[in-house]
Image: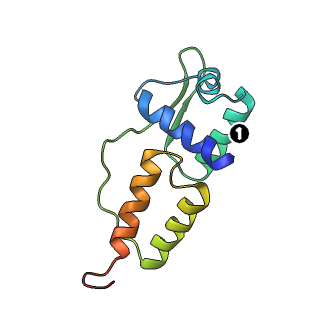
Amino acid sequence: MLVERQHALIEELRSSAPRYLSAARLAQRTGTSVRTVARDLARLCAAGVPIDVRHGPGGGYSIDARTALPPIVLTPGEAAALIASLVAVGPYVSAAAKSSLDKLLAALVVEGSS
């Protein structure tokens, strides 16, 4: 599935940052082809994911791998869209997906309501 592959690519880049990984190495680590990796990374770049691309020897792909992000304010509708996306992918596809779903759901719960 496309979303699972893209998530795996982002996680591989994040765990290797700041080093650059070649498309061949990413293909090996994600069990796909170099062509699939290139297409998936092109989609992620087009969507605005901050992937740095270096051509030539020692080049490859890298991503900003901050350990934490600044607080993000979402509307309830934006949170619902993210929840629907996570549920569609499967919240148990990774620990990060499960954790983010838990945080979004907790943010939507109103104190004192059941």
Query: Three-letter amino acid code at disc 1?
Result: Arg
Across and down, in percent, residue 102 comes to 39, 61
Q: Is residue 104 above or below residue 9?
A: below
Q: Is residue 103 above or below residue 25?
A: below
Q: What is the crowding at mark 1: few (fewer than 14 residues within 10 Å), some, or many (at least 20)?
A: few
Across and down, in percent, residue 48 comes to 54, 52
Q: Secondary structure at mark 1?
A: helix
The residue drawn where x is 43% and y is 48% is 96
Task: Say which of 12 and 89 sits in front.
Answer: 89
Residue that protrudes farthest toward the bottom in the picture: 113
Q: Quadrant of residue 73?
A: bottom left
The residue drawn where x is 25% and y is 84% is 112
Residue 42 is left or right of residue 51, and the answer is right
Residue 77 is left or right of residue 103, and the answer is right
Task: Say which of 111 and 104 sits in front.
Answer: 111
Q: Quadrant of residue 35?
A: top right
